[in-house]
Image (tube, helix red, strand yellow):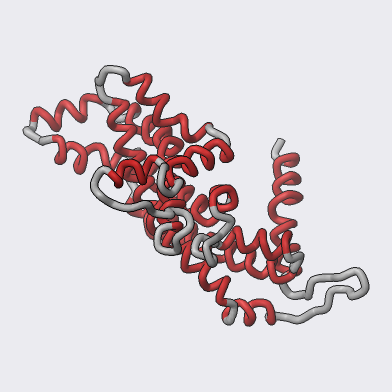
Amino acid sequence: MLLPAVVLLGAFTHLPAVQTVISALYTTPKANRPARFIGLDHYRFLLDDPVFLKAAWNNLIFAAATVPATILISLGMAMLVSSKIRGRGLARLAFFTPTVLPMIAIGNIWLFFYTPGYGLLDQITGLFGFGATNWLGSQETALGAIIVVAIWKEAGFFMIFYLAALTQIPPQLIEAATLEGAGPWARFRRVIWPLVAPTTLFVLVNAIINACRMVDHVIVMTRGGPDNATTLLLLYVYETGFRFWDTGYAAAISVVLLVILALAGIGQFILLDRKVHYR
């Protein structure tokens, strides 16, 4: 029964990954020039490539900002919609809606928010006396604007996992903690947080993966600009491989990205998995 799954996994995941590692060792083949073995030259070029270094730094900032913010906001939203509040169903729908919206629609919504002069953000900041800001056209604000959009879209998706985890917590535990005199913060820290730790580890791993494979938001809203201020690693792979058709160099960047993801995944499961309480 597992054979079809193993064949598909090998054909569409492991085989392309191995082929990518091999391609990174060769030059890009042209019509009148076959691929030539160059060893690790592509990786040496990466160390002197300012666009690659800029993209790696941007990706680090992007992950450091989106991952913890997404976890905290999604957990907060899940706790809110799992409590006994009026309009709980509408709140769940409102929080989850950004997840199902197509990327083009999201881009148009946020382009309206960020439009200099008459966008929603400038209308709000104008009430406090601030002037117009080119949120997506300025190097100081463009990456932050993309980060806000990513958090807004992903928090609702991860809320679903936290919502499922919260419904599995026996209410007797909360009642017992309340009878013992535990306040809201103590109940969260001593009861809820340890019991949702496996979900947090799952969300953490997936949020880091999403941060490293983010490309559609950037293409729709800034295409990496201005002056590579919002270029992320996967966008640089796309631009290098499909726009400039340097597939060998793009393969080398992809291998670096795969190594980063593998190290992050191994580190999380080895170091953090020991501190997670599984019921």
Residue drawn 46% across the image and 30% down it: 97
x, y percent for residue 93: 42, 24
Indicate left or right for 19 with 114 as reference: right
Q: Nearer the viewer, residue 267 or 28?
A: 28
Q: Position of residue 73 (x, y in %)?
A: 33, 41
How far from the left and from the top, in percent, is residue 45? 64, 80
Residue at (71%, 35%) from the top-left corner?
1
| Relative image position of residue 10 (x, y in whole percent) | 73, 51
Quadrant for residue 156, please give it: top left
The answer to whether one can see residue 56 in this image is: yes
In the rendered view, does 166 fall on the left or right side of 34? left
> How many marks do you count on the picture?
0
Snapshot quadrant of residue 192: top left
* Residue at the spot 36% in from the left edge and 54% down from the top edge: 274
Query: Residue 166, relative to residue 51: is it above or below?
Result: above
Pick whichever, 83 or 93, lies toward us: 93
Q: Residue at x 37, y 31 (%)?
A: 163
Q: Quadrant where the C terminus lies?
A: top left
Q: Is residue 247 visible?
A: no
Q: List the single residue furthest toward the right.
A: 32
Q: Is residue 13 left or right of residue 181?
A: right
> From the viewer's perspective, is residue 123 above or below residue 41?
above
Which is more toward the observer, 75 or 53?
53
